Image (tube, grey):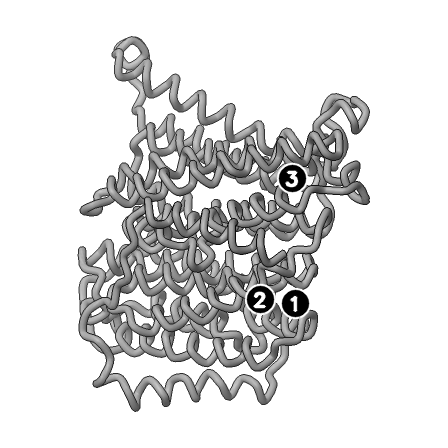
Amino acid sequence: MNASILALIPAVFSILIYLFGSLRIEGSIRTRFRLPLTLEVKVLYLLGVFLPVVLLPFSQGGVVGGYSRILGVEVGLDSITQLFLIAELIVFSMSSFYALTYTTEWRKLSLLLLMHSGLIGAFISKDFFNFYVFMELSAISSFALVASSREKDSYKAAYNYLFLSMTASYLLVLSLGMIYFSTGTLNVKLAQGREVPKVAVLIASLALSLKSGIFPLHVWLPDAHSKADTYLSAILSGIAVKAPVYGLVLLSYLADLSFLRPLAIMSMIFGVVMTMLQVNAKRLLAYSTISKMGYILLAVSYNNPYAAAIYSFAHAIFKSGLFLSVGALVDARNRKELDYLGCRNCYIILIAVAILSLSIAGFGITVGGVAKEVLSKAIGERVLIYGVSLGTAFSFAKLNYYVWKGYGHKPSIKRSIPSLVLGLIALGVGIMWNGALSYKDILIPLGFVFFLLVKDHLPKRDYLIRVEPNYGVALLVLLISLFSIIT
């Protein structure tokens, strides 16, 4: 079975949900059959989410429709693709369980399945045009879902996200046109070895960096990820930002992307410093994503797609799990400040947060520890990687300190289980991948001690750097101009 079916299935069920929802609003089916709308929609939604999981072992790559590679659309399931795709299926499955405890609104569930379809399609693509179409399908769905959040100013966050992402999309289309006119194809394998305009590579890579939330093009990310509903925050931060990363991986097969290394390093450092200064728990996790995307971009800049894919997989698991666990507390308390998230009476959340925090800090036997070790061995930069990891340990020592500090209204078991499952996956995959304890793990207790020493001197409210979207566009243009001169 061609892997393109995996992307088609969620789109079909998304349309079915929309049709059922629309018809029931009209009243025709409801009056005639008297079936509960929520049950029908839930069944369709779950089928759209889990059928690709069931069919993945029976799927294979190839050109859709049996055409030649020059004429057809090629999809693939190589080792790099599989890491991204499996991460997407895991994150979307766990987030969907949470989503169904949060909403049964058919419009949102239909949009989620379109996002699911777009992400799957992007990750299996082996030509740039197909990748672009599916990535944009995912992005358009996410704009609407962020705007539909109950959070204050979610419309503004969605607008900033839309404005900057669409600007990047226009530039990406321009660069893909330049690649096509230069090479005669947008198929990655056919374009390899052919001369690609440097300016096209530059524009495409910076546009994709903006969509990935890389500093200083990150200005849309903290609000979009922190103001979205919990299940959507987990998807956005866990896997949606990996779609443009996969595009960078495809681009790295055609050209050297080492000029992105300074952005990767700055993103790692800026993200972790801002994470350390946050009081809003969801914003803390959002800034942490900026730092971790720097790790992944660093691997891409060293032309090591395997290390980028491994760290993307690890980040998808532990970050989505952290958003679901912290988000369960936020939804139960209707407060995001760390002071209000104590949950010593909720053991499931405590265990999940502890395991996932160890993983994001790079503890040896977890998936995060294995990914960090693969990254450091593949590209070097050990001082940078472990230095930033110390800051990460500090930040998540702070998170664990506050969740252990007090008591409060407990989230439901249904909302607690998905994060625990992701925590167990983070631990189990780390062990399966031969993760081991090492002397480097001392960074984690050092981070905790460092936090205890300075906790009374940390800001009592969020330290924010707000940038309007038009300035984000100006930054993008400035970087394109600057790198054009340098490279």
- Residue corresponding to mark 2: 428
How far separated are the C-alphas under marks 2 and 1?
6 Å
Q: Are marks 2 and 3 in contact (CB under 8 Å)?
A: no
Q: Are marks 2 and 1 in contact (CB under 8 Å)?
A: yes
SS class, disc 3: helix
Mark nearer the viewer, 1 or 3: 3
- Disc 2 residue type (three-letter): Gly
The crowding category of the residue bearing disc 2, from other C-alpha atoms within 10 Å (few below 14, some 14 to 19, many at least 20), is: some
SS class, disc 2: helix
Percent across and percent down for residue 78 are 73, 47
- Disc 3 residue type (three-letter): Ile
Q: What residue is drawn where x is 53% and y is 40%?
A: 119
Nearer the observer, 300 or 414: 300
For the question of whether residue 479 can be seen, the reply is yes
Q: Is residue 3 left or right of residue 475?
A: right
Q: What residue is drawn where x is 61% and y is 39%?
A: 54
- Residue corresponding to mark 3: 124
- Disc 1 residue type (three-letter): Met
Q: Is residue 178 left or right of residue 254?
A: left
Of the residues under marks 2 and 3, which one precedes in the sequence? 3
- Residue corresponding to mark 1: 432
Q: Is residue 85 left or right of residue 410?
A: right
Residue 238, label in figure: none
Q: What residue is drawn where x is 36% and y is 38%?
A: 162
